[in-house]
Amino acid sequence: MSKCQPYLIGLQHFTLMTDHRPLVPILNHYTLDAIEKPCLQHLKEKLSPYMFTAVWRAGKHLCIPDALSRAPVDHPTPEDENICADALAHLRALISINTVSAVTAVDPSRQDADRTLQELRSAASENSTYSQLLQCATSGFPSNRYDLPNSVLPYWKLWDSLSADRELVLYGQRVVVPAVLSRHTLASLHDSHRGVKSTKRRARHTVFWPGIDSDIRNTVQACESCQILLPSQQQEPLMSDDHPNRPFESVSADFFSVAGKSFLVIVDRLSGWPVVIPCGHDITTPHTIRMFCRFFREVGVPLRLHIDGGHQFTSLDFQKFMERWGMYHIMSSPHHPQSNGHAEAAVKSVKHLIQKTAPSGDIDCEAFDRGLLELRNTPNFTGRSPAQVFYGRPLCLCLPAHPDSFSQEWQAQQEDCDRRAAARVGQVTALYNSHARPFPG
């Protein structure tokens, strides 16, 4: 370990493997006053600067150390014993970079172009508690939690996941937000007026502070609009009949009205990407056909269209329109919303968003735009948001997000979401149905 000091001294933690099992408890748990043999005391004292955990492994599995011990260098040269000064200085510089900031190098000009991150850096540099946390993340946490300032104690259990990037502290790819900006961040998280679980999933991609889950829950419960529009009926058992393989291969559509104004919502059945089209008072078949044509012009023609039995969709003109565009028409009963549950769920989310952000029905406003963007960027139970499925990446919004949260390293962790989603279909159905009961016929 002395010869490997340039590699080990800067690490906050590493694992030491040995084939001598009695050494493991001595190295891990014994203090100097509890060790009687002087040679072991000397060994323990020399290893005290390093932060490691000793584990036992059978000698037959320690191939490289065993081979070196059986075939040592007969006549070691000075090069075998020492590392040249230039190489040592270079190694220390690399270790310093890796331990001070465990994030991927990012172009500073690209970071500074993000105004939200600029404000976050400014607030972080002026916050004394955040400065103490940054100091701990930069130079390392003490070995005893009680040596930490009280304000930094909540981060003790997270020390191995914290890193620093200039004035910011990162928890994984998430930015640790100073307390002074937590209320503003909560407001941005709640722009979409989704429930507690959806808002938590959104936060887990970008921001963090201790107690964020309870703060999100309190924020949602304190929202008067969200409480007024809570569901009033027990949910029915889950029903699913379509499994598309690519975005906008299969879509659902439905009409709804808010404040006397009609809207058409079209939602992709794979990603959940919602499209909201204001109709005013014109919901006739010709106008409906024109709205679908504009939609096809932007995203392409789906193979299947799930709609209810509204008069716009059952007319002969609409049937001919479907045939001209080569779509299959899957119709459900207009008096049984559960049979078109995918569209109904999208209608519920968008309708609640309009009622909470634009009660007059005029969605040409900033509050609705921000809410719809958050809705499209909020991950579902698979861990991916509609934007990630549709575009292959999350959208840049008003939440403070470190550039590394968009990097390939973190996006690669989402690649197995489809496999996990397929494996969880049965689990989700069982969990959903555990709180559901069919309505009496």
Image: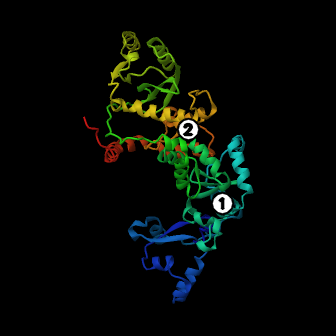
Which corner quadrant holds the C terminus? top left
Q: Compare residues 204 and 347 and report the one nearer the observer.
A: 347
Question: Would you say 318 lies left or right of 107 here?
Answer: left
Height in image: 291 above or below 340?
A: above
Height in image: 186 above or below 320?
A: below
For label 1, the crowd category at 10 Å Cα-Cα, with few meaning under 14, some 14 to 19 and many 20 or more, is some
Q: Secondary structure at mark 1?
A: helix
Percent from the top left, x then y, of residue 353?
53, 35
Residue at the image point whose x is 56% and y is 32% from the top? 359
Residue 161 appears in which quarter of the rendering?
bottom right
Question: Would you say 314 lies left or right of 111 here?
Answer: left
Q: Dot 1 corresponds to which residue? A: 91
Which corner quadrant holds the N terminus? bottom right
Amino acid at pointer 1: Leu
- Let me know if residue 269 appears in the view: no
Checking the image for residue 374, the label placed there is: 2
- Answer whether labels 2 and 1 touch (C-beta < 8 Å): no
Checking the image for residue 237, the label placed there is: none
Closer to the chain start, of discs 2 and 1, is 1
Question: Would you say 81 lies left or right of 115 here?
Answer: left
Furthest toward the left, the residue is 441
Amino acid at pointer 2: Glu
Residue at the image point whose x is 58% and y is 47% from the top? 206
Height in image: 290 above or below 126?
A: above
Q: Using the numbered discs, state the Cα–Cα distance from disc 2 to disc 1 in whole angstroms.
A: 44 Å
Height in image: 375 above or below 186?
A: above
Percent from the top left, x then y, of residue 84?
68, 64
Q: Secondary structure at mark 2?
A: helix
Q: Compare residues 339 and 35 and report the one nearer the observer.
A: 339
